[in-house]
């Protein structure tokens, strides 16, 4: 399981440039699917067929990660950049980033006397080029980079960039592996461009036209020193979302998740996320509406290169997803 | 000159009738299909009905003002229709309503200002339009609530190949689209002159749903910060350096393969171009990309200085090269496009 997660999280894939991540995931899941396709936006859609008596279910986890995009190359070869997805200046300062072609850069800053003045437009990427000409042989305006950092195995917990949301993709892949016979047609959609506005989920949900939507994504926790108040804790089980800024989860879907967890003794906790959204926000508003919910993977330090998850939680999320998909769904 | 007629037409969001009339007159008899939908989009097809569908969108609406009240003294209160900086509204001559009644947005009398007032810009909700009326009754006989207000700016060519005018965002995109639709194409080219882009890309949303394109190009007049005091990394675009190709904005990320194709064509054919070096703003490419099961999109823009102000500046060479680049792309996808 750890090796699968490592492959997923270490792959390159800022929003709109998920090709490499898609290749890694496709390679892993193709053998468990009855059919795989890629749509025009780049969503990877894998179908696991049911016996024809159940529902059409869309399961979504996003392949894209946060990153940076080059806006300008100056005469001395420094790159100015903007954010792709939510990025705090203090989190990126001093970090390494990697472009799709393997070029690595470090993030430096103009002189800033007060940390409050530390904004992204004060920062730049240094790729070790002496001038514009040299820099432009490696990088162009419009190129995107992600964090360059390997996953760390802390035993029962893992730390990496890109847990948001490759860990959701990993839960989906593991569920595909472990699933037995099911009455339901299960469309596993590995979506693009979630971090910039749930875009891949919107178009793929239109194409799939599901009767039930389940997103797999990370959620933050309230269990670190002097954290925000939030009932979710690392290691306390799968988080069943009640609401976030993009969706109020359908009560029947939420209850289905909780009842399934209780029935199979899967540890779970309820989640109310005050800020943030995920793919179910787009899925539930598609066509005439789709009852939708979210299984969240509790994660500390989201949108940094040190996103931390717990293996017990991951196991719980996989089990919960498998049991929901294997059973008859009556909403 | 078509661009002059387009720029001088009045058309705040939702009230684009004058712009529509110019376009319909210009394209009448020269296209294979032309219709107007319920939101006021002008939808035009050039080329056959079947084949890879490309939707080109340029928005007809402009940012301006709208009458929101009449005081007992006969002055007009207004709200902003679309994003305009409060500081550029002050001390301007405007035209009110379809009959273009001249009006003046007065400043505070300088002599009566306190020191603090002199340092703070006046908020637009504290301003009013004076149309030379003495009473509410008199003003009401000329103006009604909801009437559009535009800045009184005349279009002109100046310098070496430059133009100045109101509403270059996005009448210059409309002009690019008209030129494209006058040419013949062997694939279905759907040109949409959209309504209500400035208030949330609303026209393009329903037009894209109805056309269901495989590819989309938003044609824009875009921001340029090529003015004194801005350093290289903040210029965004520069008029005269060619059409600007979008890399990402708040509304969409271009399809990477379509983007590569456009950049490749420009390089191959020696069409000057620049990247739009910011990620702020948004345009009709967003709703086109996300209609139905999705479409591949890019944004091509003509750089405009002083955008969203009473008078913007653009370069005619950029305009010509934008038409050329769109044409090269359309030719290149005659056999279809594989994203």
Image (spheres, helix red, strand yellow):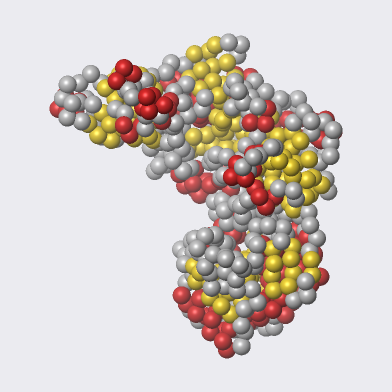
Residue farthest to the top, as pictured: B159
Q: Position of residue B321 (x, y in %)?
A: 65, 24
Residue A91 in view in this figure: yes
| Residue B196 located left or right of residue B229 | left
The quarter holding residue B216 reads top right
Above or below, B223 against A193 in this view is above
Q: Is residue B136 left or right of residue B117?
A: left
Q: Residue at x 74, y 31 (%)?
A: A74
| Numbered disc total | 0
Relative image position of residue B4 (x, y in whole percent): 48, 18
Q: Position of B308 compared to A320: left or right?
A: left
The N terminus of chain A: image quadrant? bottom right
The foreground one among B226 and A24 is B226
Q: Could you tell me which residue is drawn at 59 percent across and 27 percent down?
A: B225
Closest to the observer: B212 or A76?
Answer: A76
**Rendered image quadrant of residue B248:** top right
The answer to whether one can see residue B46 in this image is: no
- Seen at 74% across and 53% down, the residue is A147
* Residue in the picture at 70% in, 50% down: A92
Which is nearer the eye, B203 or B165?
B165
Q: Position of residue B95 (x, y in %)?
A: 33, 22
Relative placement, left or right, of B226 versus A13 is left
What percent of the width, then of the height, locates residue A32? 75, 74
Q: In the figure, A244 relative to B266: above or below?
A: below
């Amino acid at each position: 399981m750890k090796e699968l997660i490592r492959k997923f999280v270490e792959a390159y894939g800022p929003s709109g440039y998920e090709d490499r991540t898609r290749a890694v995931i496709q390679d892993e899941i193709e053998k468990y699917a009855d059919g795989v396709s890629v749509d025009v936006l780049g969503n990877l859609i894998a179908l696991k067929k049911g016996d024809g008596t159940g529902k059409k279910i869309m399961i979504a986890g996003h392949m894209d990660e946060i990153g940076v995009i080059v806006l300008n190359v100056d005469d001395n070869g420094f790159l100015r950049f903007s954010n792709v997805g939510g990025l705090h200046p203090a989190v990126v300062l001093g970090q390494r980033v990697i472009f799709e072609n393997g070029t690595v850069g470090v993030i430096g800053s103009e002189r800033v006397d007060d940390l409050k003045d530390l904004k992204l437009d004060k920062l730049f990427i240094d790729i070790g080029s002496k001038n514009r000409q040299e820099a432009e042989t490696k990088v162009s305006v419009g190129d995107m980079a992600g964090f360059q950092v390997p996953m760390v195995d802390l035993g029962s917990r893992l730390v990496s960039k890109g847990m948001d949301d490759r860990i959701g993709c990993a839960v989906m892949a593991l569920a595909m592996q472990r699933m037995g016979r099911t009455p339901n047609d299960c469309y596993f959609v590995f979506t693009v461009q979630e971090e910039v506005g749930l875009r891949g989920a919107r178009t793929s949900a239109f194409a799939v036209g599901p009767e039930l939507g389940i997103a797999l994504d990370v959620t933050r926790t309230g269990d670190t020193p002097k954290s925000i108040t939030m009932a979710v804790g690392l290691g306390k089980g799968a988080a069943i979302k009640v609401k976030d800024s993009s969706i109020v989860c359908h009560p029947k879907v939420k209850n289905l998740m909780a009842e399934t967890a209780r029935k199979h003794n899967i540890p779970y906790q309820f989640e109310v996320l005050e800020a943030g959204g995920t793919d179910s926000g787009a899925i539930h508003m598609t066509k005439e509406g789709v009852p939708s919910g979210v299984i969240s993977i509790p994660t500390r330090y989201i949108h940094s290169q040190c996103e931390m998850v717990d293996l017990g939680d991951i196991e719980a999320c996989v089990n919960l997803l498998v049991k929901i998909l294997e059973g008859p769904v009556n909403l | 000159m078509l661009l002059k007629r387009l720029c001088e037409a009045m058309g705040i969001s939702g009230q684009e009738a004058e712009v529509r009339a110019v376009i319909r007159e210009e394209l009448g008899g020269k296209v294979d299909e032309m219709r107007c939908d319920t939101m006021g989009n002008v939808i035009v097809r050039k080329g056959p009905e079947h084949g890879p569908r490309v939707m080109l969108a340029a928005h007809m609406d402009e940012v301006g003002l709208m009458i929101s009240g009449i005081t007992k003294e006969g002055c007009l209160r207004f709200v902003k229709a679309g994003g305009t900086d409060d500081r550029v509204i002050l001390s301007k001559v405007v035209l009110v309503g379809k009959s273009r009644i001249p009006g003046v947005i007065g400043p505070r009398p300088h002599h009566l200002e306190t020191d603090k007032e002199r340092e703070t810009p006046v908020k637009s909700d504290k301003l009013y339009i004076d149309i030379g009326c003495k009473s509410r009754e008199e003003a009401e006989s000329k103006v009604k609530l909801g009437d559009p207000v535009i800045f009184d700016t005349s279009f002109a060519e100046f310098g070496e190949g430059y133009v100045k005018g109101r509403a270059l965002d996005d009448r210059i995109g409309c002009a690019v689209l008209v030129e494209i639709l006058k040419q013949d194409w062997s694939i279905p080219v759907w040109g949409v002159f959209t309504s209500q882009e400035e208030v949330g890309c609303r026209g393009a949303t329903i037009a894209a749903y109805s056309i269901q394109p495989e590819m989309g190009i938003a044609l824009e007049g875009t921001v340029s910060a090529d003015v004194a005091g801005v350093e290289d990394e903040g210029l965004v675009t520069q008029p005269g350096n060619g059409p600007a190709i979008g890399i990402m904005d708040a509304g969409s990320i271009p399809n990477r393969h379509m983007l590569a194709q456009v950049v490749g064509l420009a390089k191959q054919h020696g069409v000057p171009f620049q990247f739009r070096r910011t990620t702020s703003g948004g345009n009709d490419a967003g709703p086109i990309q996300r209609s139905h099961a999705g479409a591949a999109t890019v944004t091509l823009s003509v750089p405009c200085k002083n955008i969203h102000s009473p008078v913007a500046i653009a370069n005619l060479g950029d305009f010509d090269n934008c038409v050329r680049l769109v044409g090269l792309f359309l030719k290149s996808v005659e056999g279809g496009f594989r994203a």
